[in-house]
Image (cartoon, rainbow, N blue to C red):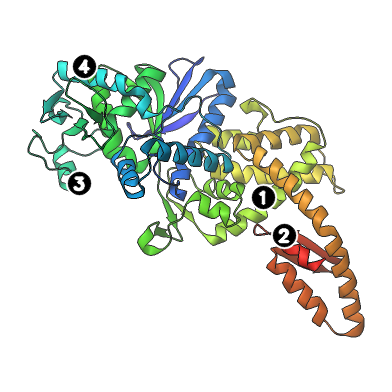
Amino acid sequence: MTIKLYNTRTRTKEDFVPLDAANVRLYVCGPTVYDRAHLGNARPVIVFDVLFRLLRHVYGADHVTYVRNFTDVDDKINARAAESGRDISEITAETTQWFLDDMAAVGALEPTAMPRATQYIAQMVAMIEDLIAKGHAYEAEGHVLFAVESYAAYGALSGRSVDDMIAGARVEVAPYKRNPMDFVLWKPSSDDLPGWDSPWGRGRPGWHIECSAMARDLLGETFDIHGGGIDLQFPHHENEIAQSKCAGYGFANVWMHNEMLQVEGKKMSKSLGNFFTVRDLLDQGVPGEVIRFVMLSTHYRKPMDWTEKKRDEAEKALDKLTVALEAALTFGKPPGTSVDDLPEGMKLRLLDDLDTWGARTVLMATAENLLGQVGKDFIGGDPERTAIEFLTGLSILGLYELLLKRNAQKSSQNVLLDPFAVDMTIRRNLAKETKDFTDFDSRKARLESAGVEVRVLSTGVDLFPRPDFDPSKLEALK
């Protein structure tokens, strides 16, 4: 079987052929750790988490190496330290753990390696020295800069000429630059800033050099896939390619970029009041599986629009998937570990450039099929096989573990709500007899204020926990 991936470098969808099928290598640019991850930061994490899972299902879990870095030396971190009066190492340790916790909440596996930039300063210095020796970089006033004109293919990834990039980019104008597009590999540090000894004096690395040095050290001179958001295509990825190629590395064979995220059709920004972090949503009662499911609703190469409508639709879809999960678990089988354990339609869609929208659609149909096979309206087929395919589909989309927790939580919440449902049924029957619904409606309003959905049926009253369910508010109703 063959995975097809869209290669940004060639602008075509290609058959993916790993350099070594026994060690498929993936590098993705990670966060700069100075604050909480916003919702847009979660998109590449989820996109490349699905790719990581797909590669593991195709080549085997032990044959895929996934590296995602942390940038823990940066001017934004320095500024946050200056504002807060806190130590830089304390800030980066805290925000790194925030990122890991929030990404775990949306179902992301931890990569094989998660290097910190500050752990690879020696490798960066060595690479910079090599670039200077080869005539691709130069020292000027304590800085070391990459000479863009020394790399003839500069701009090939983004498809722009150097003149176009100068016109359209914010380039730092500095008297020590030979060319406005030359970018910093090393810069001096004052006594109050982080710094390391180097042949050019005490200083710190520029942003772009870190990924080239870490990818080289952890994945080799040439590796399979480099990923990240489309906002990194230029200048970050363009600069990575230039310095790596000039150092003599083959670097990445395939480049993948996910498109940007919007909120209700508009770019997310603090000025529009539609900026929020992953933690903001989690604290508001939006479960991680809902965030993930909405993210999977759009192909990674298309802009993704977060809307309240999609959030509501995700909640309903996940409720149905959770019911199907309960049915699948009755067979006592775990998810499969091969791509051939997927429903055929899911396999075809994921192998075709990671079509998560199509895969999600097939997964919902598989859930319906499974419920029909194990329910009273038996429609034939092999329910155990369908159950394995369904569980494997959940797993490869990163929903299996999240829905196990959702199922356990809903079960415990339903047990908690059962006595209230009986009580509401009694009150409902009494109200129908007396024609006085004052007490029932008051009780209903108080339940709803606790995050409980009240459904009045002909057979009685059912209660369901909403995402904002607060069990502590039930105490006053006992």
Question: Are the residues tagged 3 and 1 within 8 Å (C-beta)?
Answer: no
* Residue that appears at 21% across and 27% down: 202
Q: Is residue 456 above or below residue 109?
A: below
Question: Are the residues tagged 3 and 4 within 8 Å (C-beta)?
Answer: no
* Residue that appears at 78% across and 49% down: 411
Q: Is residue 212 above or below residue 349?
A: above
Query: Residue 466 location in percent, x, y?
Result: 68, 59
Q: For this rendering, which residue is in front, 384 or 327?
A: 327
Distance from the alpha carbon under mark 3 to that under mark 4: 28 Å
Q: Quadrant of residue 428?
A: bottom right
- The reply to whether residue 60 is visible in this rendering is no
* Residue that badge 1 annotates: 318
Sequence-wise first label, 3 or 4? 4
Under mark 4, the amino acid is: Asp
* Residue that badge 3 annotates: 170
* Residue that badge 4 annotates: 130
